Image (cartoon, coloured by chain):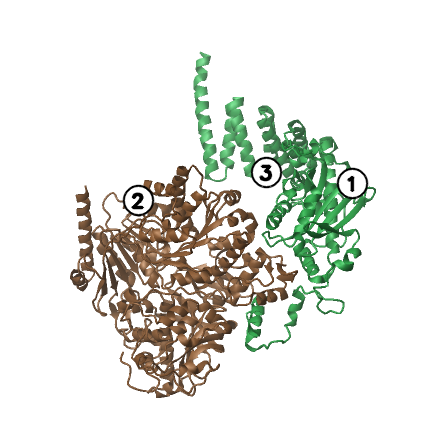
Amino acid sequence: MSGTLARLSGNKDQALQDALGHLAPDAGRAVQALPGPEGVAAVHAQVSADKVVTAVRHIPAQAARYAPWPTDVDPRLIEALAARGIEQPYSHQAEAMAHALAGRHVVVVTPTASGKTLCYNGAVLSTVLREPGARALFLFPTKALAQDQLAELQGLAQIVGQAAQRDIGVFTYDGDTPNDARRAIRARANVVLSNPDMLHAGVLPHHPRWARLFENLRYIVIDELHAYRGVFGSHLANVLRRLQRICRHYGSNPTFICTSATIANPKGLAEQLTEQPFELVAESGAPRGEKFFVLLNPPVVNQALGIRRSYLSEARRVALEFMRRNLQLIVFAQSRLATEILTTYLKDAYQAPPGATEAVRGYRGGYLPLRRREIERGLREGDVRAVVSTNALELGIDIGALDVCVMAGYPGTIASTWQRAGRAGRRSGRSAAVLVASSAPLDQFIVRHPTYFFDASPEHALINPENLHVLLNHVKCAAFELPFQDGELFGKTPVSTEDVLQVLSEEGFVHGADGQWNWTHESYPADAISLRAITSDNFVIVDITEGSRVIGETDYTSALSTLHEKAIYILEGALFQVERLDIEGRKAYVRSVECDYYTDAITYTKVNILDEFESSLGEAGQTSSDGRSGVSNPARNEADVDRHPGDNSGASEQPAAADTDIEVPGQAAFSERAVPPDDGLVPQPNRAGRSHGDVHVVSRVVGFKKIRFYTNENVGSGDLDLPEQQMHTTSYWLTVPRAVLLELPWSPDDRRDGISGLAAAMRSVAQLLLMCDRRDLGVSVDTGTGEAGVGGRPTAPATGDADAHVFLYDNYPGGIGFSAPLFRMHDQLLTQTGQLIASCPCEVGCPSCVGPVGDIGPRAKRVALDLLTRLQAPSAPVDDVPF
Amino acid sequence: MASTLNRLRDIARGTPGSASANATAGQAEPTGKRELTYVPVDANGLPADPRDHFVDGVVEAVEGARIVETAHGACMVIEHRFEGHRSHGRVRVEQCGEIALDETLDVLAGRALRGDRVDGAPPPRRLVYFDLETTGLSGGAGMVAFLAGVGEWRDDAFVTTQFLMPSFTTEPALLHALNDYFGDDAVLVTYNGRTFDVPVMEMRGEMQRVPQVVCDLPHLDLLHAARRLWRASEAGDRSCRLTHLEESVLGVGRVGDVGGFEIPARYFQFVRGGGMAGLEPVLLHNRLDLLSLAALTAHAQRLVRDGREQAPSNATAFGLGALYERSGWIEAALPCYQAAADDHWQTRELRRSAARALARLLRRQRRYEEAAEAWQRLLQLGGRPQILREAREALAIHHEHRGGQLEEARRHAVAGVEQAIGRGERDDFSRRLARLERKLARVSAEMPLWNE
């Protein structure tokens, strides 16, 4: 029997190797050349940047590491788990449980399929067995994830409960919970599975009803911690301040157990979100089989325009190579539309064996739960041979382990890429992950710089809980929940709680008297706050194709640029055209259309610097606004001159200073008082100036472009007349000293094109470094004339009369914490921008690097590279830094 | 720091502007905003000092007001007597004293108010009317019941006692004082108290950890009885708001009454030192609500006691029927429904509802022949297909299974198929029709045998 299994798995390994060999001839050789499973270190064969397969990496197998049960674990739980086939925990599970049971907050970094749920379920159930009254609150980023965990946890709780002759209540509590069930849940649930939105609007404001939960709350479990970054994370940090405030009121002091995918700062993120000290468990003891990771770039079909073959067709070809050899696979697509397209491609092309009804399935949000469960089961049982999915299957939903993962397009972050790749791979036997790059700048950077992808630490998850908009709203909610006592602080925010209450009092929201601040407003403040947006001033999108129904919401800041008349609004892959924008009524009326383009607004943007928090101006002699320019004239450090912080020769490239600083970007980004001393910074060896601070952004949408999907061709445009928008936010900016501008042997117009090309590329790289969405960052260029830019590009030529600036600002009022980290990653940003532009095979610029030639001017690419070289030169002109 | 404050102000006002960029500290506030804030002003138009605590002088200014010291702090109590001989609209206040805690009140409540108390507590004997004024309608921990009004008939007068929170910190005192007032022999009477006032008190009790007696009292929520009694008649608009019923049923017209929407703002003004002046209309509003509630309860009880014969109209009779039926007074309910269904002066809609209620009740009583008559009456009245469908189906069943009149059953089934909306309905009738056809065929096949 076991012999058959071994042979089967051996065949599978062979099939996998064959398929890899067929992806491209050179890839086959690379795979053969790699050491076998007994190889010790991860090896990777870089093939060539020009080839279709640009890199293959072999990740060796790892055996399981077990540990004994921590002594505090209840024996009845151990017995119940043994009945389920779990004899012994993996080392990371044991470590996490030991921390949690001892009351230490713990964050566990867990790759896919490493048994993360036991880390918290074990500790929670063990405690519930010992103390029947104990309660736990589990937070998942989505309702679907909570539902998915419910079945498993309920099953375990039932077995454990039977052993202990007790009923252990496990319930989900979310917007779908029927009203009559809510009372029972409040009274009986030992474990409540919910999400932050429900906690924020449905639980905390009604905390007296939940008194029993809060009085006995022993654990707060936050699953998928890495999902809480940017706006969502900034909100969650404040929701957790409210939660802990209420726990204190009821006299409980719960222990946090968090799990996270691999990100650079899991401990820092957990500590920033909860304001508690954490233990980190980062070493997984789970076994894994060997894996091949292949990076693949579709061939160029038009050298001049830099156009490659469609990545979807390429993904189809790759998927079929595996499917033909009877390997089970998952294909990740970037949008719902792409998911449907690929599903159709594969269904058409794959000759299913007779009897297999639906061997290829699509999977995305919007499918009914029943259908999803059916597909998940089909995957586990092997009937479904291939599934094409959006990111819906990236998180912890159980689909068993597949043979191959094909990613059509770079998922956007390194963390997410590994997470998806982890969907393929059994605990033994070989598996493969193939990333097919699209022509987007990030994708191109990744496939052309495999070392960056494989060796760099994954992204930092950044949040800014001190965003004044966010903070103010949550202080309102907190005051609603419990009166603030005089002198009480809201979490550990550096913003004076008293100031916030004072302002709220002026506006009639609270009233301070007799030593406390009471809520004095008729409204229910949590209703007005969405955890997924900064401000509550939203536009609703009304679909008038048939009747009229609201299909979505967009925050005010991005409404004008995404919902102007004739704009294409994309919802879950479906396309709508805006017919009318009612700015007063905050409504956009859209109608369903079929077209092959999307729209990109052309925006006049002007950025004024309000307050410079930190700066170091590379070129001596420039003025600095706040006297902190001391750092800009550093003692020259010879060792640093030759150093290229971004060249990735080693695995952990982040300068030590950046690592520690990024843990607390919020404080640094927010308040002038909170700026940490600058002594940790590496002295600036080059001529580029860098700064970050508060800025005032004025923008006006003046027109739009129609961009064809996939090729990014510009296929039309239109003019618009819309009101001006203003925003106070935070920004990082690059200063191009006047002297550098004047040195450039190009005309002022070309210089302008060069700077804006540079800005476009910097934005892409910043997106990569910050783990953010493209629309999270705004870009604006000032060529030194102070004139507004259009579409992130300046109109005025760069005459060299004054310094030029490239602003990368947080595209949310108040900022969400990108600027200070970007300031610290300045060197890396410039180096990688240089790499992105230089390694792009296009001749004169393309959408994958500096922007399309038609938009950006004929010499933008060359000028941008020249400019970068000069900016990265040491402050006093010496030899060019080799690239 | 000034810039942070200014930015916070901009955000709090929802004006994402550039004030922080150019406004300097100490500059005047935008004046347009002033009227929207809750800062109270004194006689000279200057912001009032919130430290001018209301207690001195204010209590004396309000008639019937006194400060009650509890073990948990002070609470302001306002007592007021509505003398029995005075009139309230078309009725006299003394009618409130005629309410009896008997089975007719149980009919109004839809439950036994004097249920057996197992814990040996004294049987309830006082009727206490209860109404809250709150700082909003949203629910949640931040919504406070700043005024709890209770009323009861005592010493030839309807006496209201209002517990007012002079400041937020005095809530525990109010909650304790209210508990003391209710004791354990009261029956609670509210208007919509089941969904609002009682849950609010439950939440406040949980919030301050003073469990509220009021949550465990036997409770008559008159709203539900009022809806049954008056929704169908011209006396109640669809919502059966108390102010509407007091006008149409009791003939009370309030002059200058404070609107419910402005009540929270008036209290916020008061706690900011705005004095009692703004709050007195709220106190009056609350007292009138209590009095109207009591008078309406008295009126409703009299209707229940007097029965159909005395009902002012057959519309009210229909409402009475619903109340009787809910309490199991079947013999009283049937003539009410019958009268309403037969009354040509009533709207067709009301008559249909009455006929349908009658038919259903009779069927439940297994009085099938009478039920069939009522269904037939309903068919004659015509109306919405859903209602007719129910009648067709009931008649088809009746004639098929009980009457044995297959032809008649078939006639209804055919009409049902014709009038059905939607596939499911049509299929139901079609199946029934097919079965009837089979039965009829069998019967006609058997006929000759008998003849032989």
Residue A246 appears at what percent x and percent y? 54, 54
Q: Are marks 2 and 3 in contact (CB under 8 Å)?
A: no
Up the image or down, A396 lies above or below A271; here it is: above
* Residue annotated with mark 1: B154
Q: Secondary structure at mark 2?
A: loop
Of badges 2 and 3, nearer the viewer stands: 2
The answer to whether B68 appears left or right of A787 in the picture is right
The chain letter for the residue carrying disc 1 is B
- Numbered mark located on residue B383 in the image: 3
User: What's the residue type where badge 2 is placed?
Assistant: Glu
Discs 3 and 1 lie in a common subunit? yes
- In the rendered image of the structure, the colour used to display chain A is brown
Task: Name the residue: 22% across, 50% down.
Answer: A326
- Numbered mark located on residue A541 in the image: none
Using the image as rendered, state which of residue A645 and residue B408 is in the foreground: A645
The chain letter for the residue carrying disc 2 is A
* Residue annotated with mark 2: A87
Using the image as rendered, state which of residue A651 and residue B269 is in the foreground: A651
